[in-house]
Amino acid sequence: MERQKKIPPKPVIIEGKVEFKVEKILNKRTVRGKEKFLVRWKGYIVEEDTWENRENLENAKELVEEFEREYREEVEELR
């Protein structure tokens, strides 16, 4: 039996803009002085994770803050 491809969820409209739901923030890096976050999109596969600027994640502030809290704690443990 051939494996069926999972159909990702449809985007939502927030303040007139098409938005996708963030499942989790996975990593963070700085490129040319701008913070970028590796995003796992809800309902999408790993290969579709993308690096996004902070300003693109306005509707996922809680997840960004949670990631930064955990990231800070991990850095502190390494010291």
Image: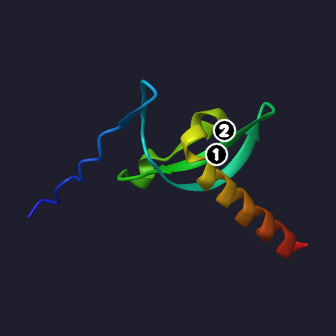
**Element assignment for label 1:** strand
Outermost bottom residue:
77
Residue drawn at (37%, 50%), measured in percent from left and top? Answer: 44
Quadrant location of the C terminus? bottom right
Q: Nearer the viewer, residue 55 or 48?
A: 55
Q: Position of residue 38 (x, y in %)?
A: 59, 48
Q: Residue 70's quadrant in the figure?
A: bottom right
Disc assigned to residue 37: 1
Left or right: where does residue 66 sit relative to residue 15?
right
Outermost right residue:
79
Disc 1/disc 2 C-alpha distance (Å): 7 Å
> What residue type is disc 2 on?
Arg
Q: Are marks 1 and 2 in contact (CB under 8 Å)?
A: yes
Q: Position of residue 8 (x, y in %)?
A: 29, 47
Circle 2 packing at 10 Å, graded few (<14), some (14-19), many (20+), is some
Q: Nearer the viewer, mark 1 or mark 2?
A: 2
Left or right: where does residue 4 sit relative to residue 62?
left
Left or right: where does residue 71 sit relative to residue 25?
right
Outermost top residue:
16
- Which residue is tagged 2? 54
Residue drawn at (64%, 45%), measured in percent from left and top? Answer: 37
**Element assignment for label 2:** helix
